Amino acid sequence: MADSHGHLVFACGFSLYAVPADTASEVVTVPSLTRVPGAPAHLLGVFAHRGEVLPVVDLTRLTGHALDADFRRAVLVRTPKGAVALTATRVLGVSTLEGTFDRLGDTGVQQHLRGPARSPHGEVAVIDTQTLVDFLAHAA
């Protein structure tokens, strides 16, 4: 089944992810980060962007993979519950996805990922941005 809305597809390391295009407000170059003492490993730090302090979350660490690539960009995701910058090594553009969109797991971050989904760029994990932002707020 194809989705009826576009998704922004991006890579973080060797994995492809997608977020609903209407929640991806922009792609930014990440400046120097301010570390947060005692933060989990996936929270790389925070930075000020247009008067707002945003956390930067490394998807490779959040999903349990080793940091395998440097990043310079992040996808800013905005939901009614807050905003977060998700690290991106490549941004591939907005695509229509096909697939089942079932939860990829029942615990941790896996319950906020959907799939398997296919884009023109390959198989992607679709991030449920609404629940991920809430999960990250309570996981810190």
Image: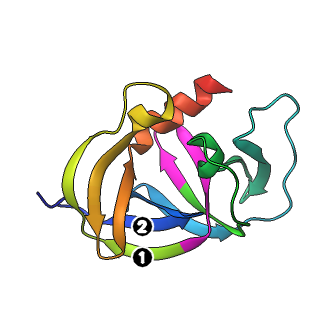
Q: Which residue is mark 1?
A: 93
Residue 34 visible, this angle: yes
The residue lying toward the viewer, choosing from 86 and 100, is 100
In the rendered image, which quarter is residue 99 located in? bottom left
In the rendered image, which quarter is residue 73 located in? bottom right
Residue 94 position within the rendered picture, expressed as x and y whole percent measured from the top left: 36, 73
Q: Which residue is mark 2?
A: 9
Which structural element holds mark 1?
strand
Q: Callout 1: 10 Å neighbours few (<14), some, many (20+)?
A: few
Q: Do labels 1 and 2 touch, CB within 8 Å? A: yes
> Which image quadrant: the C terminus?
top right
Residue 63 left/right relative to 123? right
Residue 106 position within the rendered picture, expressed as x and y whole percent measured from the top left: 37, 25
- Label 1, label 2: how many angstroms apart (C-alpha)? 6 Å
Vertical placement of residue 53 versus 95, above or below: above
Residue at 78% x, 54% y: name it: 48
Residue at 58% x, 69% y: name it: 27
Residue 13 position within the rendered picture, expressed as x and y whole percent measured from the top left: 60, 63
The residue lying toward the viewer, choosing from 54 and 18, is 18
Vertical placement of residue 108 versus 31, above or below: above
Residue 136 left/right relative to 16? right
Magenta span: 77-90
